[in-house]
Image: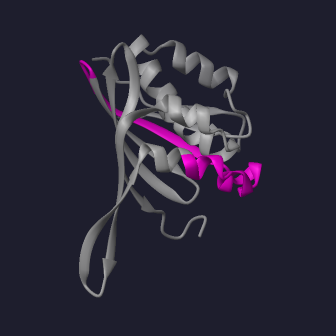
Amino acid sequence: MKRICLTIAFTTMMAIFAVASLDWSVAVGQQDGTAAESQAVQELSDDEKAVRKAALDYAMSWYTGDPERMKQALHPDLVKRTIQTDGGESDFDEMTAGRLVEIVAGGYGKNTPEDQRKAEISLLDVDGNIASVKLEMLQWTDYLQVANVGGRWVIVNVLWEPRHGEGE
C-alpha cells in the first residue's frame, strides 16, 4: 500500500509537508477543502478517498448539525466509547449510532465558531476491507475503525477522549 503523509496548514498559505502517515488538516469552514488538499486527495486510491470521506462526513456533520450526513458515515451497529474514571474505577461510556445521530440533530456542534472548527484526519492504515483513522477535532480525539460493508466505507467503532488543553 502506498503511504503518503500530507499536512495541510490553513493558517499560512497551505503548506504541504511529506511525513510518515497520511494526514489532512481541514479548515472546516471551507467544507470541501482547497486546491492543495484536492490535489493530495487525487493521489489516493479510491478506497483511501472513501475512508477519508467517511471521516470527514463524521466531523462535518457534527459542526453543521447534519444528522443525515452523520447517518451516511456510520454503520447502524456502530458503538462509540470513551473511558470514564470515577473514584479510581474505570469503565466505558457507550453511545449507539442512533444516539449519535440524535445528538448531531440537536445542533450542538454548530455552536463552535467557524474559525475554531478543526478536523485533522490521519489515515493510519487501509488493509483490504478495513481501515483505521485518527481524527482530531477541536475538543476531542477520535480513533475510527472503518469497514467496507456492501461496497460502502462506514465507521463501525469509535474510541474517543477529550483533548486536554485545547478547546476546553
For residue 33, above or below residue 162: above
Q: Residue at x 31, y 77 (%)?
A: 85
Q: Nearer the viewer, residue 113 or 16?
A: 113
Which quadrant of the figure contains the N terminus?
top left
Q: Is residue 104 visible in this depiction of the protein?
A: yes
Q: Nearer the viewer, residue 19 or 156?
A: 156
Q: Is residue 45 visible in this depiction of the protein?
A: no
* Residue 144 in the image, given as x and y percentages of width and height: 37, 41
Magenta residues span 102-129
For residue 120, above or below residue 113: above
Residue 130 is left or right of residue 143, and the answer is: left
Q: Residue at x 74, y 40 (%)?
A: 29
Residue 30 is left or right of residue 39, and the answer is: right
Q: Residue at x 53, y 42 (%)?
A: 120
Residue 115 is left or right of residue 38, and the answer is: right
Which quadrant of the figure contains the C terminus?
bottom right
* Residue 111 in the image, given as x and y percentages of width and height: 73, 57
* Residue 140 in the image, given as x and y percentages of width and height: 49, 58
- Residue 140 on the magenta segment: no
